[in-house]
Image: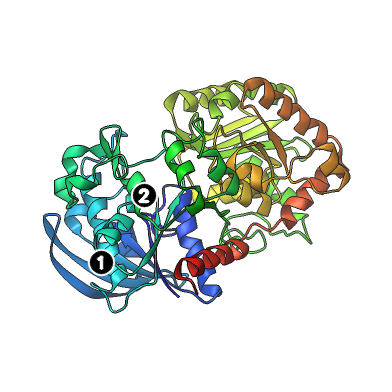
Amino acid sequence: MRILMVASECFPLIKTGGLADVVGALPLALGKEGADVTVFLPGFPAVLKGLSGKKTIKEITSLAGGPAKLISGKTDRGLSVIALDSPHLFSFDGNPYQTKTGEDRPDNAIKFAAFSKLAADLATGKLGPKAFNILHAHDWQAGLAPVYLNLAEANVKSVLTIHNLAFQGLFPYSILPKIGIADRHYTNDGLEYWDQVSFLKGGIIYSDHTTTVSPSYALEIQSDAGGMGFGGLLKSRQQSLSGILNGIDLEVWNPETDPAIAASFSATSPNGKAKNKTALQKKMGLRVSGSTPLFCVISRLTTQKGLDILGDLTDHIVLSGGQLALLGSGDSAIENKFRDAAKKHPTEVAVQIGYDEPLAHLIQAGSDAIFIPSRFEPCGLTQLCAMRYGTVPIAGRVGGLNDTIIDASPAALAKSAATGLLFYDITAHNLSATIDRAFSLYKTPKTWSEIRQNCLSHPVGWRRSAKAYLDLYADLLEI
């Protein structure tokens, strides 16, 4: 089975969020199950620089106003990649989608439409040495690939995965003639969405099957409340909509071998976690204490993530006897809440604005618990990484958080099954009460140790989900 995975990001080549982690790990997991997977990426400088064994497989005279070529290569993990080297579209550093001032890049529609068109041509064998059985597109940046496949009446099945419905790829109607799509597709049953063109809607309408990244999120987005304007559309297509949980790369996130942490540990030998806690406290300027519960945040600092609420509860955490280490960036108002808390409690609250991959690993390894109080969460990878490192997630009972975390209810504690703490509705009162519950559990070392041990032993890899994707592909191909 030959699969073309189409996305705008892939770890470790280029990453702004969880999409990159999925695209970097899922193809490798599918390969272990016998699939032949190639990832198609825009040729951003970091992508081209990170590939080894590069070879030009196709020269393209003109693409959206300039020349281009397709370059094959491999990542350091052996993942097969084809990159679209088109300097006039992708030759810039920084965020792939936004300028330094946070505005959408003005050529997003043109460059990702061109990328999607070539993905469709590549899948059919028109541009490369082989055709593919499945084109698997990810998010709005690749949303037009199933559209172009459909327009070409190609004998290739397509899957679209929605990682976050909040990002819909919306552009003015005037873009259609520039991307080679006729007016007849600008309808309620096509790409039209409230007098705009939606690349994501195009992918949903024209793909053979749509997935999202957890079963709970697949249900939530069929509602008016969770559908973000797409609820009715997705409910009407529920027979071709499913949720398959994300996993994490167990080699990248492995506390037994992780070079970014201070001491190795595992489910069978967890003692090294305490050394990581000391190392983290020292690195971030916190008071060193093995008995003080150390909470953390590794996240975009946005209202979606519920961090506006948590920002108002830092005094409560400190006065209750806890510490907080935060790594992230986002809304300036939320950043400032945490900066102010760090100034007020310099030995108990530490804040680093930005993102630092090695530090993220040390924070996961050294913390006792992690806050993920999301208002909605398609799947979430942070809680999976946290459990892999024995860090107890405190999370909103939504989407993939609900599907991957077992709340420390009396029933779960009685069966020694709990892996975290869940709460809902996402309010300051409910989060505060859940923080109190975490302190209470932490003060019972045997119980907290059991929850931590359950986290360390919880399966968070890709194997089961990779098999679910292969079953889906096989159903589409009727094999």
Report which residue position mark 1 lands on. Answer: 121
For the point 59% across and 21% down, the residue is 312
Quadrant of image for the N terminus: bottom left
Up-down: is 54 above or below 385? Answer: below
x and y, in percent, of residue 331 in the image: 43, 29
Kind of residue sitting beneath label 1: Asp
x and y, in percent, of residue 249 in the image: 56, 61
| Viewer-nearest residue: 191 or 239 | 239
Report which residue position mark 2 lands on. Answer: 205
306 with respect to 86 (left or right): right
328 with respect to 132 (left or right): right
x and y, in percent, of residue 224 in the image: 49, 31
Snapshot quadrant of residue 321: top right
x and y, in percent, of residue 452 in the image: 76, 48
Up-down: is 178 above or below 122? Answer: above
Kind of residue sitting beneath label 2: Ile
Snapshot quadrant of residue 90: bottom left
